[in-house]
Image (tube, rainbow, N blue to C red):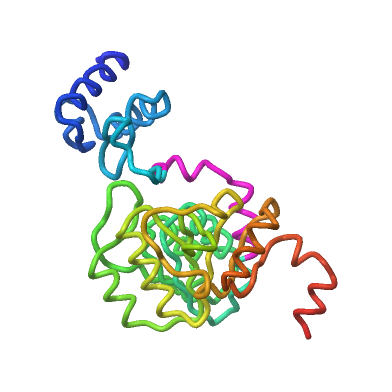
Amino acid sequence: MWVAERHRLILDLLQTHQRLTTEHFAEALGVSRETVRRDLIELERSGHLARVHGGAVPPAAAPAVPPEPAYLERTGLQQPQKREIARLAATLIQPGQACFLDAGSTTLALAQELAQREGLIVITNSLDAAMVLACHRRHEVHLLGGRLEDDVPATYGEQTVAEIARLQVDWALVSPVGIDAANGAMDYLWHEATVARAMLGRARQRVVLADASKLGQASRVQICPPAEVDVLVTDGGADAAQLERLTAAGVKRVLQPEAVQRPTDSCAAAA
């Protein structure tokens, strides 16, 4: 079936049913869900529909908050900034310490950075992060149990949260969809926010990783308010006014390249 024909059939189905899941589209068209996801991305970009979690709706029915891009799409975005954030965040964790990593493209970049170090205990719900760390055999790596999702290769659900609740760690590092002064750190999906919130609740130090594009952005489900963020790690392109609003709202510390490179900051930290 040609792409144009698939697109026409998808729009016809959507006009009839108003909301359909990716699985229903795939079954109706006789193609894979990955093919349908690519089609939905193209149709959304052209304004013919709006993607929602698990499927699509007509443009008029789109939610006020836009959906988060698919995981595979996110892994290709803001790569220099994510590596910059990962390098900074990795300096926080010392050998012998334990940390939580949630599942996301930024925390995956952090896992790749941590893989070059030694002697950490890393607990994560991300299959990708666990594999990156386990392959180097320099750390003690634990993969949380739970339900596997079809977009992000990670575990979620009651089992995941229950396992987190049994542990106490030095650091929790999570990467939300956005963070703003009014709402704090937020995710688009309930199950992702629930796991991130559980991790932050069982850590002595709570770290949010967010590149400049996420600052000042809100989403659907709160992970934590600004006052519960001990460290915000961002990149060199972060807007100073946004950072001022976040610190005024309660974010305790901002870590970004310029701050760690200035000698005066180093002296202040030592003091």
Is most of the magenta stretch helix, strand or loop? helix
Q: Kindly identify the residue that appears in the image at 41 percent across and 55 percent down.
A: 128
Residue 266 in magenta stretch: no
Q: From the image, which quarter does the C terminus lie in? A: bottom right
Seen from this angle, which residue lies furthest right? 263
Write the start and end of the magenta stretch as one range: 69-88
Q: Nearer the viewer, residue 86 or 63?
A: 63
Q: From the image, which quarter does the N terminus lie in? A: top left
Residue 190 image position (x, y, % from top left): 31, 59
Residue 13 image position (x, y, % from top left): 18, 24
Q: Is residue 240 above or below residue 255?
A: above
Q: Nearer the viewer, residue 213 or 100?
A: 213
Residue 86 in magenta stretch: yes
Residue 235 image position (x, y, % from top left): 65, 55
Q: Kindly identify the residue that appears in the image at 34 percent across and 52 percent down.
A: 153
Q: Kindly identify the residue that appears in the image at 41 percent across and 71 percent down.
A: 123
- Report whether 249 appears left or right of 264: left
Image quadrant in which you'd find residue 7? top left
Q: Is residue 158 above or below residue 23?
A: below
- Report whether 49 appears left or right of 168: left
Residue 183 image position (x, y, % from top left): 46, 63
Image quadrant in which you'd find residue 102? bottom left
Seen from this angle, which residue lies furthest bottom? 271
What number of labels is visible? 0
Q: Kindly identify the residue that appears in the image at 33 percent across and 54 percent down.
A: 189
